[in-house]
Amino acid sequence: MADYGTRDIRNIALVGHAGAGKTTLVESLLFHGGSVPVPGSVEKGTAVTDFDPIERRYHHSVNTAVVSLDYKGRHINLIDTPGYPDFLGPTISALSAVETAVVVINAAGGIEVLTRQLMQIARDVHD
């Protein structure tokens, strides 16, 4: 593992409504960044960030999970957050720990109510 200075580390939270594709995006980033040989699948219960048996059984995130990859001289910490309102607390907590929030939106469903709330919370946390 490379030795990174603070300026070379990025902390990114992926937030959005349930089913928007946050975990799938994380899996794709891990794969393309070379951290995993094959991207995991939410549907198959093989997603790296869905480590809890409940997450694997019900095919959605319950916990906030942190994974990392090295890419173009940077160390990137990705925080995959749950998208159901019942698990909003850990998602909000993750926003205060990062400098970047990626809002993932399901193209078919559009911007949903929780997504709008998360965008406002992200703005408020970083103002």
Image: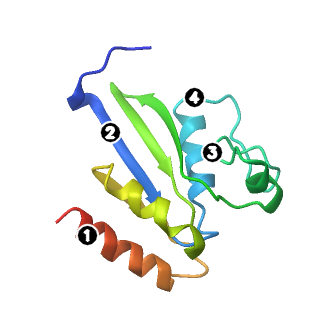
- Marks 4,2: beta carbons within 8 A: no
In the rendered image, the vertical position of residue 5 relative to residue 88, given as above or below: above
Question: Going from the N terminus, do you reach mark 1 or mark 4 first?
Answer: 4
Task: From the image, tell me which residue sits under label 3.
Answer: 49
> Which one is in front in this view, the residue at disc 3 or the one at disc 2?
3
Question: Foreground mark, 1 or 4?
Answer: 1
Instruction: Kindly report the distance in space between the C-alpha atoms of the residues bearing marks 1 and 3.
Output: 25 Å
Q: Residue at x 79, y 62 (%)?
A: 58
- Residue 99 at least partly seen: yes
In percent of width and height, residue 62 lies at 64, 59
Locate residue 77, reporting x and y percent.
42, 38
Q: Which residue is mark 4?
A: 35
| Residue at image mark 1 | 123
Distance from Cα at disc 3 to Cα at disc 2: 18 Å
Q: Quadrant of residue 38?
A: top right
Earlier-in-chain disc, 2 versus 1: 2
Q: State which tag comes first along the sequence, 1 or 3.
A: 3
Q: Which residue is identified by label 2?
A: 10
Q: Give neighbour class at mark 4: few <14, some 14-19, many 20+ (Cα, 10 Å).
A: some
Residue at 31%, 76% in the rendered image: 120
Q: In the depicted view, which residue is nearer to us: 11 or 41?
A: 11
**Label 4: which secondary element:** loop
| Left or right of 24, for residue 56 | right
Q: Residues within 10 Å of mark 2 (few under 14, many from 20)?
A: some
Three-letter amino acid code at the position of disc 2: Arg
Between 17 and 97, the one lying in front of the other is 97
Residue at (52% x, 57% y) in the render? 81
What secondary structure is marked by label 3? loop
Label 2 to label 1: alpha-carbon separation: 18 Å
Q: Secondary structure at mark 2?
A: strand
